[in-house]
Image (cartoon, rainbow, N blue to C red):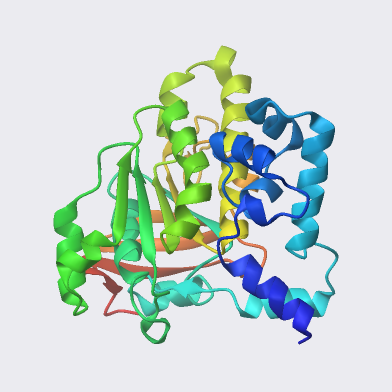
Amino acid sequence: MSEEKETVKERSSGFISVRDIPGVGSSIADKLEAAGYLSAWSIVVARAEELAEKTGLPVLTVQKIIESARKMLGITFKTAREVKQERLNIGKITTGSKSLDELLGGGVETKTITEFFGEYGSGKTQICHQLSVNVQLTPEKGGLNGRAVYIDTEGTFRWERIEAMARAIGLDPDKVMDNIYYMRAYNSDHQIAIVDELFTFVPKNDVRLVVLDSVTSHFRAEYPGREHLAERQQKLNSHLHQLMRLAEAYNVAVVVTNQVMARPDVFYGDPTTAVGGHVLAHTPGVRVQLRKSKGNKRIARVVDAPHLPEGEVVFVITEEGIRDSEEE
């Protein structure tokens, strides 16, 4: 690898201040930082019109800043082989179940949104708790030596589960809880604002996993009926793309949960479908449906992933966390 490419790799993995972008003077940097744009990556993934509106800078000036940031970070055409090398360097977090990890291609990936959807009690929140613990493990044990952000929209976060899961894998529960940053989102606007804030929070706090449990509940409650459908979908679409940019910019794993609703037109097979329609169907990189089975058993099925075959496995939810079923 050339010296120039090594520099690009180093830059892309860490926090680079907007003040390091060529051509950005102190007065412009002050305006960018005041608007919440602290890193070069936060500039790269922003839309020019949005950046201009929030900073008060002319659109032409903003476009030049974005272009300069792209060049500095080496964002340009890549060969398919370079893309392959990047994919090989993607981090993966174990779920605690080997069979579920195999279904996901080795675990939950960074630079990707993974969606778990299913009915109440299907295990969505349990998986989120487990991943928030497991991300703190060493890579040899299936973690990323990193911290987690947990955005809770329904009040389902339980520290007791984090404590039990941490003890079960030999980690200090207090240290584990110190490495999980929790925030309750009280409405859709607050939820969006939290994700915007993560563009500066994530790189400064060594965060490798962002959990949003659940991504659709506020939007569903605040925009009911067909008359609000278009507005809801537009807002949800923008929010999901912001999460995608976060995952790609900082090489973090983004995990979202989603609810299901009944489809009255389905007479055979599973009558439920994930909330969010086509917006949710097309944005996440990996979509996993969870279903209840007997007792503590759950069934996970990959319904959409460009690099994974469709398939399903059985796992169990125990006092210690997510584990393999004895039948697997």
Residue 19 in the image: x percent, y percent?
64, 51
Is 240 located above or below residue 298 in the figure? above
User: Residue placed at 73% from the left, 47% from the top?
Assistant: 24
Going by the image, does 79 lie left or right of 254?
right
Is 25 located above or below residue 307 in the figure? above
> In the figure, residue 47 lies in which quadrant?
top right
146 and 94: which is toward the camera: 146
- Assign the C terminus to one quadrant of the image: bottom left
User: Residue placed at 68% from the left, 34% from the top?
Assistant: 51
Going by the image, does 212 lie left or right of 5?
left
Is 210 located above or below residue 196 in the figure? below
Counting every numbered tag in the picture gives 0
Residue 217 in the image: x percent, y percent?
40, 33
278 and 266: which is toward the camera: 278
169 and 145: which is toward the camera: 145
- Assign the N terminus to one quadrant of the image: bottom right
Q: Is residue 113 visible?
A: yes
User: Residue placed at 62% from the left, 43% from the top?
Assistant: 241
User: Residue placed at 73% from the left, 29% from the top?
Assistant: 57
Residue 291 in the image: x percent, y percent?
37, 54
Residue 232 in the image: x percent, y percent?
56, 24
Instruction: Residue lying at the far front in this picture: please name it.
Output: 26
